[in-house]
Every structure is written in C-alpha cells, then in structure tokens.
Image (cartoon, helix red, strand yellow):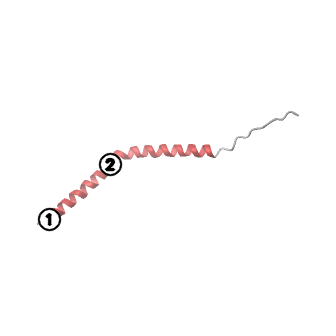
Amino acid sequence: MMTGNWTCWIWTVVGAGFLGWGIKGMVLGPVMDEKRREVARLMSKVTMLTNQPPEVRTVEKAC
C-alpha cells in the first residue's frame, strides 16, 4: 500500500521539476540571451582594440 502512494509522489515531484525548469527557461531565457549578446559585443570590441597596429611616432631631428 505504501508503494502505490510513493510512486504517485515520485511522478508529482518529477512533473513539478519539469514545470519549474520550463518556467525558469521562459523567464531567464531572454535575460541570458541579452547578457550573451552584450558579452559578445564587448569581446568583439576588445578584439578590435587589441588587433590595431601600434601607433607609429616620427621624431624629427634638427641638424
């Protein structure tokens, strides 16, 4: 008799876990996508800045 009740609770807990996982994905998904795009933008900016050729300065001497 206890086995029947326990198996019902297992499926309830598993179902609640899947429901929570789905809600978390719906709520946090757009926020995480926005953060991922921001990180990609900043990484491309850093790459662009680090790949620039060094600044060349000319020094003129008066002879």
Q: Nearer the N terminus, badge 2 or badge 1?
A: 1
Horizontal arrangement in the rendering, residue 34 relative to residue 61 (left or right) = left
Outermost residue to the right: 63
Horizontal arrangement in the rendering, residue 7 relative to residue 28 (left or right) = left
> Residue shown at 14%/62% (left/top)?
5
CA distance separating discs 2 and 1: 31 Å
In the image, is residue 34 above or below residue 3?
above
> Residue shown at 17%/63% (left/top)?
6
* Quarter of the figure with the N terminus: bottom left
Three-letter amino acid code of the residue under disc 2:
Lys
Horizontal arrangement in the rendering, residue 10 relative to residue 35 (left or right) = left
Residue 31, labelled with which disc? none
* Quarter of the figure with the C terminus: top right
**Depth check: 20 or 50 in front?**
50
Residue 46 in picture, x, y percent from top left: 57, 44
Q: Tell how many labels.
A: 2
Residue 57 in picture, x, y percent from top left: 75, 38
Q: Quadrant of residue 34?
A: top left
Q: Which residue is mark 1?
A: 4
Residue 24, labelled with which disc? 2
Q: Secondary structure at mark 2?
A: helix
> Residue shown at 34%/49% (left/top)?
25
